[in-house]
Image: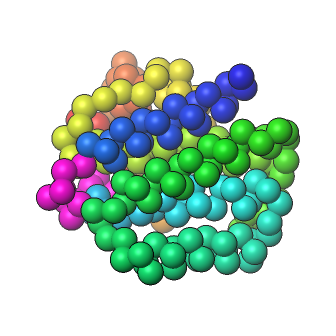
C-alpha cells in the first residue's frame, strides 16, 4: 500500500482514538490552540474530512462547499451537539478514508482556494493536521499516546524548512527547543506549541 495512504489511515485512527477518549465533561475544555475548545477542535477536523470526498472526486470549490454545507445542515437538523461529535467524526472519517482509497485517487488534482493542487500534496497537508491536532486534543483531555515515528518525521519534514509560520496567521511564533529534542517536540515548537 502507498506509504502516504498508510500514514493518512494511521492519522485518522489516532485522532479517532482521542475523540473516543473525550469524557462528557471535557467538550468545553480549552486546547493548546487557544481559539478552540475540545468541541471546536473536533468540529474543525470533521469539517476538513467532509471536504476530502468531494474534492478528490473532482468537484470544484463551490460544488464541494455545497456538499459540506449540506452535511453540516443535516447534523444540525439531527440536533447533533458536542456529545454527538464522536459519531459525526466517525462518519466523516469513514467517508474520507473511502475517498482516498478510490483507484488513482492520489494521482488526481484537487481544487483548493490557492488553485489546482496535486492530491498527494493535499493528503500530506491533511496528515500534518491530523498529527498536530491529535496532539492538541490529547493534551486537552489528558490522553497520552504517540504517533508512529515515521509519520512524525514526515510531518516535521514538511515544516522544518519553512521558518517562522506565525506570518500565516494560523500559528503562534516558534518556540525554542534544543537541537537534541525529539522530533515531535521540534514539530510542536515550529508551530508555536510548547512541548509537554
Up-down relation of residue 119 to residue 10 (above or below): below
Q: On the image, which quarter does residue 53 sit in?
A: bottom right
**Colour scheme of the picture:** rainbow
Tell me which residue sits at (46%, 50%) in the image: 90
Q: On the image, which quarter does residue 6 sit in?
A: top right
Of residues 56 and 114, the one nearer the viewer is 56
**Direction left: furthest residue:** 25
Is residue 27 found inside the magenta-colored segment of the image? yes
Of residues 1 and 75, the one nearer the viewer is 75
The magenta stretch is 22-33
**Where does the image place residue 103, in percent across and percent down from the top left?**
83, 38
Tell me which residue sits at (36%, 60%) in the image: 85
**Where does the image place residue 140, in percent across and percent down from the top left?**
23, 49
Q: On the image, which quarter does residue 50 sit in?
A: bottom right
The quarter of the picture where the C terminus appears is top left
Residue 58 in view: yes
Q: Main secondary structure of the magenta part?
A: loop
**Where does the image place residue 77, in percent across and percent down from the top left?**
44, 80
**Where does the image place residue 25, in percent across and percent down from the top left?**
14, 58
The quarter of the picture where the N terminus appears is top right
Is residue 42 found inside the magenta-colored segment of the image? no
Q: How many marks?
A: 0
Residue 36 in view: no
Tell me which residue sits at (53%, 55%) in the image: 92
Up-down relation of residue 26 to residue 20 (above or below): below
Horizontal side, residue 21 vs residue 129: left or right = left
Up-down relation of residue 37 to residue 175 (above or below): below
Tell me which residue sits at (62%, 43%) in the image: 97
Horizontal side, residue 113 vs residue 185: left or right = right
Amino acid at each position: 500500500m502507498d506509504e502516504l495512504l498508510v500514514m493518512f489511515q494511521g492519522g485518522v485512527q489516532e485522532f479517532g482514538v482521542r475523540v473516543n477518549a473525550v469524557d462528557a465533561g471535557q467538550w468545553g475544555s480549552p486546547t493548546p490552540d487557544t481559539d478552540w475548545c475540545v468541541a471546536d477542535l473536533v468540529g474543525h477536523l470533521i469539517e476538513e474530512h467532509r471536504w476530502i470526498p468531494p474534492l478528490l472526486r473532482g468537484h470544484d470549490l463551490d460544488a464541494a462547499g455545497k456538499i459540506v454545507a449540506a452535511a453540516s445542515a443535516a447534523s444540525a437538523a439531527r440536533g447533533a451537539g458536542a456529545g454527538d461529535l464522536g459519531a459525526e467524526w466517525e462518519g466523516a472519517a469513514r467517508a474520507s478514508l473511502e475517498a482516498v482509497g478510490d483507484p488513482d485517487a492520489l494521482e488526481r488534482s484537487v481544487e483548493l482556494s490557492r488553485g489546482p493542487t496535486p492530491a498527494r500534496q493535499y493528503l500530506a497537508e491533511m496528515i500534518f493536521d491530523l498529527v498536530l491536532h491529535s496532539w492538541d486534543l490529547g493534551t486537552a483531555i489528558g490522553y497520552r499516546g504517540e504517533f508512529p515515528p515515521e509519520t512524525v518525521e514526515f510531518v516535521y519534514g514538511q515544516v522544518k524548512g519553512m521558518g517562522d509560520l506565525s506570518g500565516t496567521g494560523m500559528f503562534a511564533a516558534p518556540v525554542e527547543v534544543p537541537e537534541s529534542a525529539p522530533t515531535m517536540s521540534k514539530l510542536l515548537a515550529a508551530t508555536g506549541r510548547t512541548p509537554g
